[in-house]
Image: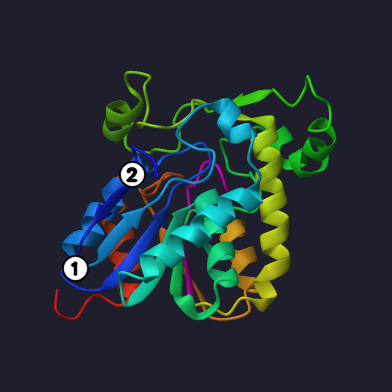
Amino acid sequence: MSAYDFHMQGSTKKGILLVHGLTGSPAEMRFVGKALHKMGYTVTAPTLAGHCLDENALLATTYEDWVASVREAIRAFASTVDEVYLAGICVGGAVALSAAALEGDCVKGVTIFSPLLNYDGWNTPFYYRWAPRGIPLLARIPFINRIRFGEDDPYGIKSERIRKAIIGNGAGIAGTLPSFPLKALYQNFRLNRALASMLPTITIPTLLIHAREDDVGHPRNALAIQQLHGGRCDIAWLENSYHMIHVDQERHHVAALTADFFGRPADA
């Protein structure tokens, strides 16, 4: 449990578990969470292992710990609702789908906001594309694996108004870290490789919501996941957002697409 976790009891027992991103916090999921709650869903958002504390806490975890924390949250949530669905942003989406696959029939569907297998968006430095090869080597060098990667303007948010509201004072979203430690990115790449190998065996209905102008991950990421997926895997494209679609100006549309895919509560 974390001070940033939240739970919203809905008018039905159809539940959505929201998974935040790498170095992120459940607070970033509140925008979409509130919209889904208004539709009748019971919504919960746990904290990934190692998050919402400090950098040392994050670096003490692996992607397996992140997945395990979501699996634990799924089991706890399943005891309070009749149907469990998962939705996660970027790395959180990969964690969500991995955890759902390991939990078997417990999860009825998954939505990934801004799915990512490679950092290859239009605002991503060119050397990120070589990171999957270089980071595993660098991560073994003690003094190098403390390297941090910061984010640049526009910080994944197309709307200048929303960007100023969230990033303007430099504080960002509550509970988040300001940069990505190299060692954490290494775990991210390990997660991506593991998920890619799992995808052909995954049959959980999955929706990928991806902005065509995503500044962090090119739309080819969604197409690659869809091609590898072993079951139903739909893609919904957004035309007026960047990477952070769950807080950007189409966030209400993101919530609506998610609800339509999962099936809106009949008695909401």
The three-letter amino acid code for the residue at tag 1 is: Gly
**Picture quadrant where residue 111 is located:** bottom left
Q: Between marks 1 and 2, how big is the CA–CA gap?
A: 20 Å
Instruction: Report whether 11 appears left or right of 203.
Output: left
Q: Please check the rendered image and state whether residue 208 is part of the magenta-colored stretch, yes or no.
A: yes
Q: Name the residue under label 1.
A: 40
Which residue occupies 44% across, 64% down? 74
Q: Classify mark 2: helix, strand or loop.
A: loop
| 1 or 2: tag closer to the N-terminus | 1
Numbered range of the magenta stretch: 206-218
Instruction: Count how many numbered circles sit on residues in the image.
Output: 2
Which residue occupies 59% across, 63% down? 98
Closest to the camera, between mark 1 and mark 2, is 1
Which residue occupies 64% across, 24% down? 148
Q: In this view, does 65 lie above or below 227?
A: above
Mark 1 surroundings: few (<14), some (14-19) or many (≥20) residues within 10 A: many
Say the numbered circle drawn on residue 247: 2
Mark 2 surroundings: few (<14), some (14-19) or many (≥20) residues within 10 A: many
Which residue occupies 19% across, 66% down? 39
